[in-house]
Each structure stands twice: as C-alpha cells, then as structure tokens.
Amino acid sequence: MKHSTRKTQGFSLVELLAVVLVLAVLAAVAIPLYLNTRKSAAARTCKANLTALAAAEAAFVVRHGRFNTTPMVDYNATDPLSGGLVGAPEGITSPLNCPWDGAAYTIAGGGVGEPLTISCPHCATAKGGDNAHEAISPSPDGFSFYYRTLSAPATEQ
Ligand SMILES: [Zn+2]
C-alpha cells in the first residue's frame, strides 16, 4: 500500500482566499434575500392584521351598533365587556400592531353614519403614511392591502 510522504501543512494562502471568496459571494446573495423576505413577511402579516381588525370591527358593530373608534385604548383593552376589541367576542386574542416596526394602526371616521377606515402608517393613503409596505410588495389595485374601509352601520329607524 502506497503512503504519501508529503507532510500535511494545513491550507495554502490561495486555498484560504478561495474559501473566503466563496463565502463572500454566498453572503452577498443571502443577506439581501433574507432582508427582502423579512420585509415581505411583515407586509403580509400587516395585511392579515388589518383583515382581523376589520372583522373585529364588524363584530363590534353587531354587538354595540357602532364602531369602536378609540383604538389606542380599546384595541389594546383586554376586557371585551368594557368595549375592547381584544377578546373572544371580537376574535382578537392579543393587541395587534404593524409587525414591521410595531407602529399602531390608525382609524379614521367611524362616527354615526360614517364609514370607518383602519390603516397602517406604512400605507401611503393614510395621512402621513410613508408607503413602506407598498415599496415592499405592491398591491395590484394600489394601496388597498394596507387599509380596510367598512361602510357605516345601518341606523335604526
Ligand atoms: Zn403595517
């Protein structure tokens, strides 16, 4: 059986440079992919949150005959009997915020005879919105992924 007589001396400089180059190329590809995936996931979760809040508002209307228009208080309230949206009757089990940066959702309207609009501050159609989500994953019809508008509840005659 033949045995090599060459002593093992570790890696040569060229071999190490080749490994470093390969790792740098992999990182250059993987890091942007990771960041884009993270942004996309936040945008999709935000859309789901807005859908859940719209459904909760619809349930709130059924119970109270009006919209819940104080989200800073009531979206985060944990007692559904006090009018909060967080609780079994409204179907939200924990407070919801935009997953991108934890920003609170805003509402507009919702008074008697008014429609209610729930939006993420990263939606350009919200006043002062920065359009961050739209830059991440454009919706086919503009910005509608990031806000929900509910028509005014019918008033009793
Ligand atoms: Zn958002």
Image (cartoon, helix red, strand yellow):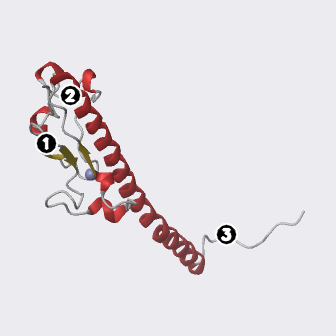
Instruction: Give the amino acid type for the residue marked by disc 1 in the picture.
Output: Glu
Cα separation, mark 2 vs mark 3, equals 75 Å
Of labels 2 and 1, the one closer to you = 1
Q: Where is residue 52 drawn, in percent x and y?
A: 31, 37
Q: Which of the marked residues, 2 or 1, is nearer the chain's N terminus?
A: 2
Cα separation, mark 2 vs mark 1, equals 15 Å
Q: Which of the marked residues, 2 or 3, is nearer the chain's N terminus?
A: 3
Query: Where does label 3 land, which residue?
Result: 8
Circle 2: element type: helix
Q: Where is residue 96 drawn, in percent x and y?
A: 24, 39
111 on left or right of 116? left
65 or 106: nearer the viewer: 65
Residue lying farthest to the bottom in this orientation: 14
Mark 3 lies within 8 Å of ligand 1 (Cβ measured): no
Q: Where is residue 106 drawn, in percent x and y?
A: 16, 47
Query: Where does label 1 land, which residue?
Result: 114
Q: Where is residue 100 drawn, in percent x and y?
A: 28, 52
Tell me which corner region of the image, top left, top right, bottom left or bottom right, holds residue 138.
Answer: bottom left
Q: Residue at position x 16%, y 26% from top?
A: 65
Circle 1: element type: loop
142 or 65: nearer the viewer: 65
108 on left or right of 41? left
Query: Where does label 2 land, which residue?
Result: 60
Instruction: Give the amino acid type for the residue marked by disc 2 in the picture.
Output: Phe
